[in-house]
Amino acid sequence: MSAPTSHEPGHEPGHEPINATTDALLPDPGLPGHVWRPTDVDERAEKRAERQVATLFGLSAICTVLFVVSYITIKGGVDGHTFIGLGASNVALGVSLGLALLFIGIGVIQWARKLMGDHEISEERHPASSSEADRSQTLAALNAGLEESGIGRRPLVRNTLLGSVALLIAPAVVMLRDLGPLPHQVVGEYPGAGLEHTIWNKGMRVVRDVVGTPIKASDIQIGDLFNAEPEALFPTEENGYPELEGAHRQIAKSKAAIVMLRMDPADIVSDVTRNWSVNGIVAYSKICTHVGCPISLNERTTHHLLCPCHQSTFDLADSGKVVFGPAGRHLPQLPLGVDDEGYLIALSDFLEPVGPSYWERNTKSPEEVAKELKS
Amino acid sequence: MRFLNRSAGRLSRHRRGPVAGLAVLLLGLLVSGGLYAALSPSSSASSTASDEQLVKEGRELFLVGCAFCHGQNGEGQTDVNGKLIGPSLVGVGAAAVDFQVGTGRMPLAAPGQQGPAKPQTYNDDEIAALAAYVASLGPGPAIPTEADYSTTGLTDEEKQAAVVRGGQIFLTNCTACHNFTGEGGAMPRGGYAPRILDTSPKHIYEAMLTGPGPMDNFSNGNLSPEEKRDVIAYIQSMRDQPGFGGFSLGALGPVSEGLFAWIVGLGVCVAFAVWIAAHTTRSTKKKESQA
């Protein structure tokens, strides 16, 4: 197993004679003679290198002190000092700490290259396997154990052991299953709970996101785009919606977000989109059906809505169908109407789950979804 | 009346007539009114005439510089294959002209996906004339005045509130294309949303009003004039922010930052490691013990 080694005269250790004839004609020259560094032969150079290394370590110490000083003296934050348009505190801390570490590194390398021992070292490798004796001994012990336990002779014991171990998978399955609800399960009672519903419902006004003001259909020009939310997320005494708090509010807001735009009604391709629009005003879920990024990158000229995460592109003139990218399902459309005062309202909740796809979600065409609204 | 008559009477008793004082008063009013009309920049009588003059000048400029693509009457043109050469300008309003020509996007240097901003080709008077002509083609948004987008009349607290609200509106409506930092970003088919940090407040306001190129409109029925003013206040406040995260590298996110980290960051480390460990100086001298 172990490689034979030879130490013949005229050969460095590790060099094996391959062919005696050629070796005699062109003898192995061996390694070239060692050439010394200036620091090995010149005492002044050695002293100089020593000073160099010490200077580098000293510079590192100075930088560390500078780090502490700038941490204390330079003002950071929004009103902090600036340096060529950058936050001065961050620049000073980063540069001083970076240089402190760099100088230690350079110093150590200079030390190793100029002053530490300068000779080649070779290390022989050993075989990775255990010795023959060890291996046969282990096998013998294993066989003796098998023989004495009688596992081959007592199938009842063996099978019950296998069965009980296999059953231990059950606790893991039960606990993993209980980590969260199944897609169709609805946990908690609040408006729009569950994957299949949002807080939108029939007659709820569409309001501008952030400012929360309702939108009059007559105020919208062709080409206008709104990032909008349901009125229930901006409760006032006037509209009388209950105050939502904490996670429920966040969940409701993230699922109900829509993009709403007005296009030339003649540009609308699909009948479903036309039926659910008001004078060319259409509204779609803002959550990409691929992995749920919020989308509002719309090209007014083409009515294409593009997701910045993976470039899924939806045609808003044609039921939000996917025209490019990895999304597997069209963007759910919100049926729009107008109330007595001329403000835009939803005619119903979304008719299919918004947001990223999941196994249990049906893939229906927009026409099939529209039929469900009628029935 | 008596006072006026007395002062007039001092020159000559014979000249005094029953209406002389009134005549002097009227003469004085006429002179001061005439001087005011001559020296003040605008009055209703002269503006109608100069508006017509402006539209006429604008039409002359339009026929030379714009009609080739937009048509002799700004009706828009398509080529023989039906591809749009220049869109119709009827109803785009003076604001669209002021934006497109004022930022140098129009006239186009060459046809392409998108007209880049460049130094103005027309001077301010010529732009005003062109805008007046295009506005005369059909009703459209007018050029906003400084009162629309300036926050100078507000108190410091109101300004702060405007920046905060403008920031929220910006982050909701603008970042999808123009980036959280306002540095702009890529759009489909070779287009791009431009950097808006150096754009003047007037041009930002006009862009929101008119939706240049593939940009959506944010008309006054969409974002109110105050909301637009707040967005502009926020964009201006972003200009003054120091870069706390260091150099922004165009603020294009993981693409430029990753490129820099992998090529420059790691490259420098590897090159430095190779350089520092290579070519130790060797001496021709022998060590004293061996010599």
Image (spheres, coloured by chain):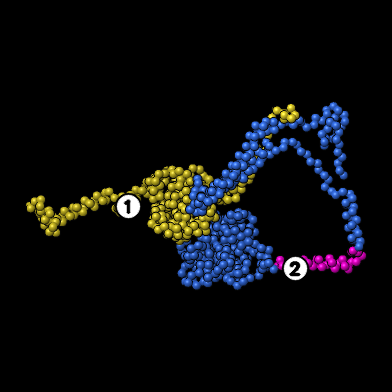
Residue B181: where, in percent of width, then height? 52, 52
User: Residue B291's quadrant in the figure?
Assistant: top right
Residue at x-position 82% and y-position 36%: A13
Which is more toward the observer, A241 or A33? A33
Which is more toward the observer, B62 or B185? B185
The amino acid sitting under disc 1 is: Thr
Which is more toward the observer, A164 or B194? A164
From which residue to which does the magenta span run? Answer: A149-177
Residue B121: where, in percent of width, then height? 43, 43
Residue B94: where, in percent of width, then height? 41, 52
Numbered label attached to residue A171: 2
Please state if B45 lies on the left or on the right of A131 as rendered: left
Label 2 marks a residue whose chain is: A
Mark 2–mark 1 Cα distance, whole angstroms, equals 88 Å
Q: Which residue is mark 1?
A: B48
> In the figure, B126 relative to A265: above or below?
above
Please state if B61 lies on the left or on the right of A351 as rendered: left
Which quarter shows the N terminus of chain A? top right
Taking the magenta stretch, the answer to whether it contains residue A160 is yes
The amino acid sitting under disc 2 is: Pro
Residue at x-position 63% and y-position 70%: A187
Front disc: 2 or 1: 2
Element under label 1? helix
Label 1 marks a residue whose chain is: B
Which quarter shows the C terminus of chain A? bottom right
Residue at x-position 91% and y-position 56%: A140
Which chain does the yellow colour mark?
A: B
- Colour assigned to chain A in the rendering is blue
Task: Give the number of callouts.
Answer: 2
